[in-house]
Image (spheres, rainbow, N blue to C red):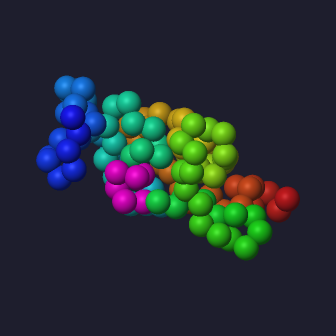
Amino acid sequence: MFRRGGGRSPAALVRAVPGPAYEISFDGRPLTALPGQSVAAALWAAGILAWRTTREGGSPRGAFCGIGSCYDCLATVNNRPNQRACLLPARPGDVITTQEGTGHGDLGV
């Protein structure tokens, strides 16, 4: 049974033993990720809750549904905009940057 403050994590409950952590970056800031984590999970673990701004008004967005349906988690990963961070596995060396609007601002569209 999961107890708050009991020091047990979901990984401990299922006796998971993740592989060694590796480095990714977010807006130039080095972060660590564990094998099996999505980009969104790695950002959450680092305390980052928003990594996109909306087209209208520039409001901050991050993961909302966590299953790839709402598209609030879109991020630019390795220079590719509009990647669903909640579904995309983090890979060693991934470079994640805040996505502004559609992520195509450099195209002028």
Can the viewer see residue 14 in this picture? yes
Q: Is residue 105 left or right of residue 96?
A: right
Q: Nearer the viewer, residue 2 or 97?
A: 2
Q: Which residue is nearer to you in this view: 74 or 107? A: 74
| Residue 47 on the magenta segment | yes
**What is the x, y in percent for residue 58?**
68, 71
**Quadrant housing the N terminus:** top left
Describe residue 57's horizontal placement relative to residue 68 as left or right: right
Residue that appears at 73% across and 73% down: 57
Residue 76 visible? The answer is no
Residue at the spot 23% in from the left edge and 39% down from the top edge: 2
Residue 48 location in percent, x, y? Answer: 42, 60
Q: Residue at x 54, y 51 (%)?
A: 63
The image quadrant of residue 52 is: bottom right
- Residue under the point 66% across and 46% down: 70
In the image, the segment drawn in magenta is: 43-48
Residue 41 drawn at (x, y percent): 42, 44
Front position in the image: 92 or 84: 84
Question: Can you say whether 96 is above or below 53 in the image?
Answer: above
The outermost residue toward the bottom is 57
Q: Position of residue 66 (x, y in %)?
A: 54, 42
Q: How many marks?
A: 0
Does 15 lie within the magenta span?
no
